[in-house]
Image: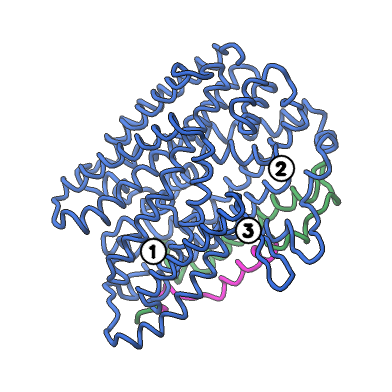
Amino acid sequence: MANGTKAGGGWSWWYLLFVIEFVLILWPPLYNSVEPSLIGIPFFYWYQLLVVVIGAVLTAIVYFATREKLGTD
Amino acid sequence: MQNIDWVATTIFVVLFLFITWLGFWAARWRRGDLDQLHEWGLGGRRFGTMVSWFLIGGDLYTAYTFIAVPALAFGAGAVAFYAVPYTILIYPILFLVFPRLWHVCKKHGYITAGDFVRGRFGNRWLALAISVTGIVATLPYIALQLVGIQVVVGGLGIGGSGWIGDVPLIIAFLILAAFTYSSGLRAPASIAIVKDILIYITAIAAVIIIPMQLGGFDKIFAAIPATKVLLAAPPPNSTGSFSNYATLALGSALALFLYPHSLTGILSASSGGAIRRNAALLPGYSFMLGLLTLLGLFAIAAGVATLPEFAAGFKQYGASFAVPALFIHSFPSWFVGIAFAAIGIGALVPAAIMSIAAANLYTRNIHREFINKNPSDKQEAQMAKWVSLIVKLGALVFILFLAPTYAVQLQLLGGVWIIQTLPAVMLGVYTRWFNDWALLIGWLVGIVAGTWMAFSVNLVSTFPLSLGGFTIPGYAAFYGLILNLVVAAVLTPVFNSMAKRTPADETIAADYAA
């Protein structure tokens, strides 16, 4: 019982969605460039701001997908 | 120093008076018995999704952040943007770990990480190590919030050198100390709502108006030296700036919620669900921080560093003056007043929560554990109120009498230290596998190694780790943590086989879920 994988608080496969955020943001060569720029903002900057939004959406998806199991309280 | 801007100063003072009133009024908000520590120090764990959003946002994205991160962009360019990946990665961690911690803390009446570790591992010395680390890491952080106030007050034209210049800071300190003492966590929670609205208005106005004034983003980025626009390509046989950037982001993200003030903000939520909802909603602040970081680059393009009216400010505050100077340069006085008030008030919110968090730790995990084992509820709450005052006074004295560089360096070391509590606190939420003494030794090894790395590079964040001719520069805190984890994992089976006792654990699996 010590490691608490029971009673609804344990693992969900939906959590794997979080891996996407880590992959998108922890490999700087992926985005360390000026082009394609967006309204004059280099890729390096707008890409990372975009990942903020992607991260929030992914977290919302995981929230709604696991809501039944974890409860809303 | 430029002349005092009376319009901006008046607006600044009026907003400060308003939040002072609000801070005292907050004692009656969602009324509870403030003679109980969980009411004074956690707001009775009654804040729903919305209030938690403002409170945790105001708590994590501090005035110092809003000054220091753009200042880093102003001085060093692209690397400052690591604040964005950093604040992206904190939310999966928040989602996965902290609702569970909230549930077990609620169930057992824990109010600090030290309480949790004491209950989970039954080892008061491990709990002491966690608690002392938290307190020590928090103190320079409070001091840096006061530096944030100093910079904006200087920007208003008040201050300069000499003791007169310290008067506004001392007044701000007295306000902060008084409402924290009287209202506890309810004060920063109510003030955070005002402050965050001001900060959002400021950030959005700044990223729309300033680029228009400077002729668009094309012109802004054309005016910035090419070496600052992107991360430098790594030299041969090294991962160079790339591993610096990634480990700074990941290490900072892992450390953030281990800070006592973060945990205090989280534990004051009314439910685990409120925390999970905030993991999806709080990235709004990350986006804003990204925009504010761009301000450091705007300040380069606007050329504020060479304007004579800002020479004295830059001389006194260094790159930290970049954002205040940019605001004065770009905005009418009345809006400068709003923007500076947002930053100034933005310093009070986290400073209040940090002092409350440090006070909770001292009261619960040092005083109650080692000095007075059976305090009444009232004695315990009273002790915490006094400690919160002492902690803030220490921060004020630090700032008044020592150079701000010491606070910056101590805060950097604080990050290296606080991350070493991760195995016991964050992994402890999921598993009781680790042996408590193994965790304590891992903690010690991580702290010693991380501190050694930081000093060996003269107190910058990143250490050039060499592996067989290949160099992987990275965040010293992160490398220290890896060592810590390895030591704890190796020693756990060794210690367990030496002592055949059943591991102590007052929590059960069901405590960690709704």
Quick one: which chain is green?
A: A
Picture disc at residue B101: 1
Q: How far across and how far down the image is residue B421, in percent?
A: 43, 62
**Secondary structure found at label 3:** strand
Badge 1 density bin: few <14, some 14–19, many ≥20, Cα 10 Å: many
Q: What stretch is highlighted in magenta?
A: A4-24
Q: Colour of chain B?
A: blue
Circle 2: residue type: Ala
Rendered residue at 84%/43% (across/down): B226
The residue under label 2 is: B76
**Secondary structure found at label 2:** helix
**Is residue B322 shown above or below B491?**
above
Q: Quadrant of the C terminus of chain A?
A: bottom left
The residue under label 3 is: B463
Circle 1: residue type: Leu
Mark 2–mark 1 Cα distance, whole angstroms, equals 38 Å
**Is residue B278 shown above or below B296?**
below
Foreground of the two, B322 or B25: B322
Quadrant assignment, res B240: bottom right
Q: Nearer the viewer, mark 3 or mark 2?
A: 3
> In the image, is residue B128 part of the stretch drawn in magenta?
no
Circle 3: residue type: Phe
Mark closer to the chain start, 3 or 1 = 1
Mark 3–mark 1 Cα distance, whole angstroms, equals 32 Å
Mark closer to the chain start, 3 or 2 = 2
Q: Could you tell me which chain the residue with mark 1 belongs to?
A: B
Circles 2 and 1 on the same chain: yes
